Image (spheres, rainbow, N blue to C red):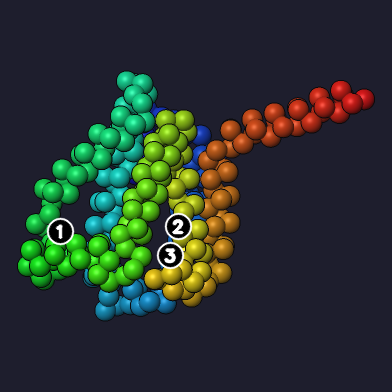
Amino acid sequence: FSVLFARLFLGTKFDMLQKCGVAVVTVGVLCCTYPQAVASGALSAAASLELWQNAGLYCMAMALTAAAVILKQKALQDADLDIIVVSAFGSVAQFVATLALLPVTLSLATSLPPQQYFELGWAAFMGGTSKAMPWLSVCYMAANITLNLSAIALVKRGGAVGTMVAGTLLVPVYGLVFCLNIPLLGAAPFSMDFVYGLAIVTAGSFLYNHAKMSTLVSDFVLKVWQGKRGLG
């Protein structure tokens, strides 16, 4: 979606190696997710209808996410906006959308009355279910803000598609991190699929950024060569 929208809205042209890089990254993500889906029975005949419904919803969500990132890049490039300004307006828009869709969200998330649902949520936030709260939530929000600002800065410097390609590296990394014995979560079963997926996604990311990688390698070799000449 990000490649398609970048071509439509920004007029970005991609060379063959970049297209291959996007394809390799997609294969790497499938290497992480497909075996897990098979093991969980998500691809069985009984679950096929629900699977395709969820896949369709996920594709719609990712299309909107890709469009949002592309529009952020356009705003950053055309208006030369500061990343704080873009992040602030994006957060406000997200808050308004969340409020507007709250009735739908509650109908899908719980069968409890809204008042009871919010009361239980507030009690959990204040430490009613864990001594780690509310500090755990505060740490999460701080990390989320940092990640959001970093992502916008990456969009400004590396483009929307490059940001989405780099973001796919988190899929296998998340899988490996959750294999650790994390407090409150425990340890998920380790799978070599995450390692293979990480290697493939990394290779795809290098392919997509081949021009920048070539420049970095050339600069490094030139500096080493100049240093040897200086010593000589």
- Mark 1 nearby-residue class (10 Å; few <14, some 14–19, many ≥20): few
What kind of residue is marked 1?
Answer: Thr
Label at residue 105: 1
Q: Residue at point 76% right, 28% down? A: 223
Write down the residue under mark 2.
171
Q: Amino acid at mark 2?
A: Val
Give the numbered dot on residue 122: none
- Nearer the observer: mark 2 or 1; the answer is 1
Whole-angstrom CA distance, mark 2 to mark 1, is 25 Å
Is tag 3's residue or tag 2's residue first in the polypeptide sequence?
Answer: 3
| Residue 17: x %, y % from top left | 55, 40
- Do tag 3 and tag 2 residues touch (Cβ < 8 Å)? yes
Q: Which residue is mark 3?
A: 33
Relative to residue 84, is residue 23 drawn left or right?
A: right
Residue visible at 46% across and 30% down?
A: 157
Could you say where residue 164 lies in the image, as x and y percent from the top left? 42, 44
